[in-house]
Amino acid sequence: MIGALFSGGKDSTLAIHMASNSGMRPELLITMRSRNEDSYMFHRPNVEFCSLQASALGMRSIEIDTEGNKEAELDDLARGLKDSGVSVLITGAVASRYQKDRVDRICIELGIRHVSPLWGIDPLAELNILARDFEVIITRVAAEGFDESMLGKRIDSSMIDRLVSLNRRYGINMVFEGGEAETFVLNAPMFSKRIIIDRHRIERDGSRASFIIEDAHLSE
Protein backbone atom coordinates (compact mmCIF):
# COMPACT_ATOMS: atom_id res chain seq x y z
CA MET A 1 0.00 0.00 0.00
CA ILE A 2 1.22 3.49 -0.85
CA GLY A 3 1.03 6.03 1.96
CA ALA A 4 2.01 9.68 2.24
CA LEU A 5 3.17 11.68 5.23
CA PHE A 6 0.75 14.59 5.03
CA SER A 7 0.79 17.89 6.92
CA GLY A 8 -1.64 19.88 4.78
CA GLY A 9 1.15 22.22 3.74
CA LYS A 10 2.58 22.98 0.33
CA ASP A 11 5.39 20.41 0.23
CA SER A 12 3.45 17.31 1.24
CA THR A 13 0.55 18.27 -1.05
CA LEU A 14 2.81 18.93 -4.03
CA ALA A 15 4.65 15.65 -3.36
CA ILE A 16 1.35 13.76 -3.53
CA HIS A 17 0.50 15.52 -6.78
CA MET A 18 3.85 14.69 -8.36
CA ALA A 19 3.85 11.09 -7.14
CA SER A 20 0.32 10.55 -8.45
CA ASN A 21 1.30 11.96 -11.84
CA SER A 22 4.05 9.34 -11.98
CA GLY A 23 1.62 6.51 -11.19
CA MET A 24 2.12 6.38 -7.41
CA ARG A 25 -1.20 7.67 -6.09
CA PRO A 26 -1.35 7.34 -2.29
CA GLU A 27 -4.05 5.20 -0.75
CA LEU A 28 -3.50 6.53 2.77
CA LEU A 29 -2.57 9.95 4.16
CA ILE A 30 -0.73 9.89 7.50
CA THR A 31 -0.80 13.05 9.59
CA MET A 32 1.39 13.48 12.66
CA ARG A 33 -0.30 15.62 15.31
CA SER A 34 2.47 16.97 17.49
CA ARG A 35 1.68 18.66 20.78
CA ASN A 36 4.99 20.48 20.55
CA GLU A 37 4.72 23.83 18.74
CA ASP A 38 8.49 23.64 18.16
CA SER A 39 8.58 20.12 16.76
CA TYR A 40 11.83 19.40 14.92
CA MET A 41 10.12 17.01 12.52
CA PHE A 42 6.49 17.87 11.98
CA HIS A 43 4.39 20.76 10.72
CA ARG A 44 2.10 22.08 13.45
CA PRO A 45 -0.46 24.80 12.58
CA ASN A 46 -3.87 23.61 11.36
CA VAL A 47 -3.12 19.90 11.03
CA GLU A 48 -6.58 19.43 12.55
CA PHE A 49 -7.96 20.25 9.10
CA CYS A 50 -5.92 17.69 7.17
CA SER A 51 -8.95 15.40 7.22
CA LEU A 52 -10.86 18.04 5.25
CA GLN A 53 -8.09 18.12 2.68
CA ALA A 54 -8.11 14.31 2.57
CA SER A 55 -11.83 14.45 1.75
CA ALA A 56 -11.09 16.89 -1.08
CA LEU A 57 -8.42 14.49 -2.34
CA GLY A 58 -10.71 11.46 -2.00
CA MET A 59 -8.11 9.64 0.10
CA ARG A 60 -8.33 7.76 3.37
CA SER A 61 -6.47 9.41 6.25
CA ILE A 62 -5.26 8.62 9.75
CA GLU A 63 -3.79 10.77 12.51
CA ILE A 64 -0.96 9.82 14.86
CA ASP A 65 -0.52 11.79 18.06
CA THR A 66 2.93 12.55 19.41
CA GLU A 67 4.22 14.65 22.30
CA GLY A 68 6.85 15.96 19.89
CA ASN A 69 9.84 15.45 22.16
CA LYS A 70 12.61 15.46 19.56
CA GLU A 71 13.81 11.87 18.93
CA ALA A 72 10.81 10.39 20.81
CA GLU A 73 8.51 11.67 18.07
CA LEU A 74 10.41 9.46 15.63
CA ASP A 75 9.41 6.42 17.70
CA ASP A 76 5.78 7.53 17.38
CA LEU A 77 6.19 7.86 13.62
CA ALA A 78 7.79 4.41 13.38
CA ARG A 79 4.98 2.80 15.35
CA GLY A 80 2.38 4.55 13.24
CA LEU A 81 3.98 3.50 9.98
CA LYS A 82 4.29 -0.09 11.14
CA ASP A 83 0.64 -0.20 12.18
CA SER A 84 -0.52 1.42 8.93
CA GLY A 85 0.82 -1.38 6.75
CA VAL A 86 2.25 0.89 4.07
CA SER A 87 5.00 -0.49 1.84
CA VAL A 88 5.79 2.84 0.14
CA LEU A 89 5.94 6.22 1.90
CA ILE A 90 5.82 9.52 0.01
CA THR A 91 7.10 12.61 1.80
CA GLY A 92 7.51 16.27 0.91
CA ALA A 93 11.17 16.46 1.91
CA VAL A 94 12.88 19.23 -0.05
CA ALA A 95 16.34 19.93 1.39
CA SER A 96 16.38 19.13 5.12
CA ARG A 97 18.77 16.27 5.74
CA TYR A 98 17.69 16.28 9.40
CA GLN A 99 14.19 15.19 8.43
CA LYS A 100 14.92 13.06 5.38
CA ASP A 101 17.72 11.04 6.97
CA ARG A 102 15.53 10.16 9.94
CA VAL A 103 12.60 9.09 7.79
CA ASP A 104 15.02 7.14 5.58
CA ARG A 105 16.32 5.29 8.64
CA ILE A 106 12.84 4.41 9.89
CA CYS A 107 11.75 3.22 6.46
CA ILE A 108 14.85 1.03 6.07
CA GLU A 109 14.20 -0.54 9.48
CA LEU A 110 10.56 -1.25 8.54
CA GLY A 111 11.23 -2.36 4.97
CA ILE A 112 9.34 0.62 3.53
CA ARG A 113 10.37 2.36 0.32
CA HIS A 114 10.76 6.11 0.93
CA VAL A 115 9.97 8.35 -2.04
CA SER A 116 10.67 12.11 -1.96
CA PRO A 117 9.51 13.64 -5.28
CA LEU A 118 10.59 17.16 -4.28
CA TRP A 119 14.06 16.33 -3.02
CA GLY A 120 16.57 18.82 -4.42
CA ILE A 121 13.95 20.85 -6.33
CA ASP A 122 14.93 24.43 -7.15
CA PRO A 123 13.05 26.73 -4.71
CA LEU A 124 11.87 29.09 -7.44
CA ALA A 125 10.70 26.18 -9.57
CA GLU A 126 8.59 24.89 -6.68
CA LEU A 127 7.17 28.31 -5.86
CA ASN A 128 6.22 28.92 -9.49
CA ILE A 129 4.36 25.58 -9.66
CA LEU A 130 2.49 26.48 -6.48
CA ALA A 131 1.62 29.98 -7.67
CA ARG A 132 0.35 28.67 -10.99
CA ASP A 133 -1.58 25.54 -10.00
CA PHE A 134 -2.23 25.61 -6.24
CA GLU A 135 -3.90 27.88 -3.71
CA VAL A 136 -1.51 27.99 -0.77
CA ILE A 137 -1.63 30.43 2.14
CA ILE A 138 1.04 31.24 4.71
CA THR A 139 -0.05 30.21 8.20
CA ARG A 140 3.03 30.89 10.33
CA VAL A 141 5.91 33.37 10.22
CA ALA A 142 8.97 32.90 12.41
CA ALA A 143 12.03 34.56 10.90
CA GLU A 144 13.67 37.93 10.45
CA GLY A 145 12.01 39.85 7.63
CA PHE A 146 8.74 37.91 7.92
CA ASP A 147 5.78 39.65 9.55
CA GLU A 148 2.06 39.34 10.23
CA SER A 149 1.14 41.00 6.94
CA MET A 150 2.10 37.70 5.27
CA LEU A 151 -0.34 35.59 7.29
CA GLY A 152 -3.28 34.27 5.31
CA LYS A 153 -1.75 35.54 2.07
CA ARG A 154 -1.50 33.34 -0.97
CA ILE A 155 1.81 32.28 -2.48
CA ASP A 156 1.44 34.08 -5.82
CA SER A 157 3.77 36.02 -8.08
CA SER A 158 3.89 39.04 -5.78
CA MET A 159 4.64 36.84 -2.76
CA ILE A 160 7.40 35.12 -4.72
CA ASP A 161 8.93 38.53 -5.47
CA ARG A 162 8.82 39.30 -1.76
CA LEU A 163 10.47 35.99 -0.87
CA VAL A 164 13.23 36.57 -3.44
CA SER A 165 13.88 39.96 -1.86
CA LEU A 166 13.98 38.44 1.65
CA ASN A 167 16.36 35.78 0.40
CA ARG A 168 18.73 38.41 -0.92
CA ARG A 169 18.56 40.51 2.23
CA TYR A 170 18.47 37.87 4.97
CA GLY A 171 19.51 34.63 3.27
CA ILE A 172 16.22 32.92 4.09
CA ASN A 173 15.22 29.67 2.44
CA MET A 174 12.44 30.60 0.02
CA VAL A 175 10.55 27.34 0.58
CA PHE A 176 10.94 27.69 4.36
CA GLU A 177 13.24 24.73 5.02
CA GLY A 178 14.79 26.80 7.80
CA GLY A 179 11.48 27.07 9.63
CA GLU A 180 10.86 30.61 8.36
CA ALA A 181 7.16 29.96 7.70
CA GLU A 182 4.50 27.28 7.32
CA THR A 183 1.60 26.91 4.92
CA PHE A 184 -1.84 25.40 4.30
CA VAL A 185 -3.29 24.31 0.96
CA LEU A 186 -6.82 25.46 0.14
CA ASN A 187 -6.99 24.08 -3.38
CA ALA A 188 -4.91 21.91 -5.69
CA PRO A 189 -5.30 20.16 -9.05
CA MET A 190 -6.29 16.90 -7.33
CA PHE A 191 -8.85 18.50 -5.00
CA SER A 192 -12.45 17.82 -5.95
CA LYS A 193 -13.57 20.80 -3.87
CA ARG A 194 -11.92 23.95 -2.52
CA ILE A 195 -11.50 24.51 1.22
CA ILE A 196 -13.22 27.65 2.45
CA ILE A 197 -12.11 29.17 5.76
CA ASP A 198 -15.05 30.42 7.82
CA ARG A 199 -13.24 31.70 10.89
CA HIS A 200 -9.64 32.20 11.93
CA ARG A 201 -7.59 33.98 14.54
CA ILE A 202 -4.04 35.28 14.81
CA GLU A 203 -1.87 33.94 17.61
CA ARG A 204 1.35 35.64 18.69
CA ASP A 205 4.18 34.03 20.61
CA GLY A 206 7.31 36.14 20.86
CA SER A 207 8.80 36.51 17.38
CA ARG A 208 6.35 33.95 15.95
CA ALA A 209 2.83 34.61 14.68
CA SER A 210 0.33 32.07 13.38
CA PHE A 211 -2.85 32.06 11.30
CA ILE A 212 -5.06 29.55 13.12
CA ILE A 213 -8.08 28.15 11.31
CA GLU A 214 -11.03 27.82 13.67
CA ASP A 215 -13.64 26.57 11.20
CA ALA A 216 -13.64 25.60 7.54
CA HIS A 217 -15.72 23.65 5.03
CA LEU A 218 -15.56 22.25 1.52
CA SER A 219 -17.15 24.19 -1.31
CA GLU A 220 -20.32 22.89 -2.93
Image: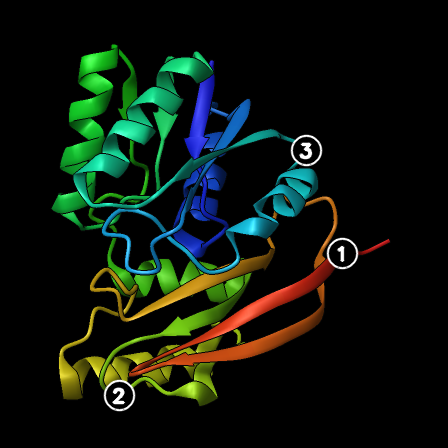
x%, y% of residue 206? Answer: 30, 83
Q: Secondary structure at mark 1?
A: strand
N-term-proximal mark, 3 vs 1: 3
User: Alpha-carbon neighbours of circle 2 within 10 Å: few (<14), some, or many (≥20)?
Assistant: some
Q: Is residue 6 visible?
A: yes
Which residue sits at x=20%, y=45%? Answer: 70
Which amino acid type is shown beneath numbered disc 1?
His
Which amino acid type is shown beneath numbered disc 3?
Gly
Label 3 sits on residue: 58
Marks 2 and 3 sit apart, C-alpha to C-alpha, by 38 Å
Q: Secondary structure at mark 2?
A: loop
User: Alpha-carbon neighbours of circle 1 within 10 Å: few (<14), some, or many (≥20)?
Assistant: some
Label 1 sits on residue: 217
Which amino acid type is shown beneath numbered disc 2?
Gly
User: Alpha-carbon neighbours of circle 3 within 10 Å: few (<14), some, or many (≥20)?
Assistant: some
Which residue sits at x=25%, y=65%? Answer: 179
